[in-house]
Image (cartoon, rainbow, N blue to C red):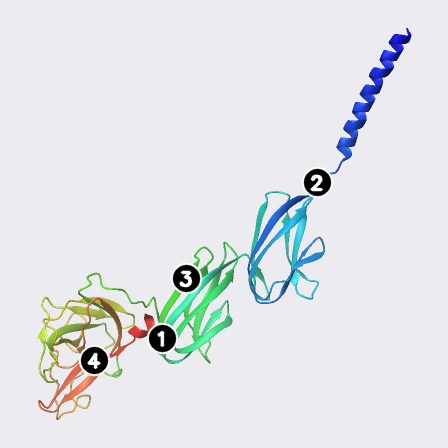
Amino acid sequence: MKLKTFTLFLFSAIIALGLSCRKAELLQPEPAKIIQLTVTGASDVALEYLYKDSIIATPPVGSINIKTLLSVKDQNATLKVRKKGTSEILLTKTITAAPFDQNISFFYDGTKVYNSAISLVIKGFALSGEIEFLLDGKLLSSGTSTINNTFFILIDKGTTREITIRKKGTTEILFTKTIESEIAKQNIDFFFDGTKIADNVKLTAPANPANMMISAKFETIFAPQFKNVDVDIVFYTKPSSATITTAGTKVTPELRLTLPKDGSFNSIELPPLPGPNYIYSFDIFEAGTNNVPYTTTASPFVNAAFPFKQNEGRYGSISFEANTSKLFIIKDTKNLGSTTRSTYFSGAITDLSQYFK
């Protein structure tokens, strides 16, 4: 009997001890876990980063690149971002116990926090006047003459923003571009003639390296007499040593570059010249005809002592450069030939190529 009682007591003690040890194990707290947090982005103002109510980083203004180890227990913790020296919280992010590598990216312009950014390259030329670039109606930049700037536009993923261009001192919008959040690099290539904006202005290499690519737009200086029609630039060749009143030889088959009346650009590839000492010359006709694009060629528009005569490649000169691309403004001209006592219509070229390389 005593043996049975002792055996039962011993068995109960073993069970009680086991339960006690198990309970102690259950009460033991989970150890803290370490994670690595990387914060990237940019800010226009100084910021402070708080974790568990302690400041863990105060990077300088500009690019953000923080990498730090944080202790996280079984419950999630919170990272907070605020302007340096203030209590206003700009951004709150949850930090979890897993995974080990965690990343946060944001951008702050001093007013609003964004979760993405794109690169915008604005490149072009303003022939006259100063133009302004606005982002969502607020001034971003301004410029005159040659303009070549890169901006980092802050934007939230899945949204759009808007760039507009206007002439300084006016409210009329000359150009609008929608900025998409999904496209990392975006461009505005433009030409401003003092009145209008032409966009997508680029130098494109010729398909045949032996040729020369020309992109051009037409402007008239004879608005009262101009028919307000599209024009054709018709090409001739002539020796560079020939006198100005020597007619050129029309290129065959005929080459015509049609330039719209609205001032937009069009392109053509010019083949090599007959020899190294030749140039291209050109006439300006109403598109699809061999007629000059004016309502009259009589006096007083044309000097009665120098009556109108077809140019036939006398005036208008283009030097040839193989495997290059040129950007021209072609303005019409009225030329008096003193030896022939005639008036010839052609064009003068402004070469903008250097501003778009």
Left-right relation of 132 to 290: right
Left-right relation of 243 to 352: left
Asked if one can make out residue 260 in the rendered structure from this viewpoint, the answer is no
Give the labeled residue for mark 1.
Answer: 125
**Considering only order in the chain, which callout, 2 or 1, is on the residue closer to the N terminus?**
2
Q: Do labels 4 and 2 touch, CB within 8 Å?
A: no
Left-right relation of 66 to 191: right
Give the labeled residue for mark 2.
Answer: 31
Nearer the observer: mark 3 or 2; the answer is 2
**Considering only order in the chain, which callout, 1 or 4, is on the residue closer to the N terminus?**
1
Q: What amino acid is labelled 2 in the image?
A: Pro
Dot 3 lies on which element? strand
Q: Is residue 68 above or below residue 120?
A: above
As drawn, the residue found furthest toward the top would be 1
CA separation, marks 3 and 2? 49 Å
Image point 66% across, 65% down: which residue? Answer: 84
CA separation, marks 3 and 1? 18 Å
| Quadrant into which the C terminus falls | bottom left
Image point 10% across, 91% down: which residue? Answer: 341
Q: Do labels 4 and 3 touch, CB within 8 Å?
A: no
Nearer the observer: mark 1 or 2; the answer is 2
Q: Is residue 184 above or below residue 166?
A: above
Instruction: Pinpoint residue 225: horizontal percent, then vertical percent.
Output: 23, 83
Dot 2 lies on which element? loop
Q: Residues within 10 Å of mark 4 (few under 14, many from 20)?
A: many
Tell me the number on the disc at residue 347: 4
Give the labeled residue for mark 3.
Answer: 186
CA separation, marks 4 and 1? 21 Å
Instruction: Pinpoint residue 220: horizontal percent, then vertical percent.
Output: 26, 80
**Considering only order in the chain, which callout, 2 or 3, is on the residue closer to the N terminus?**
2
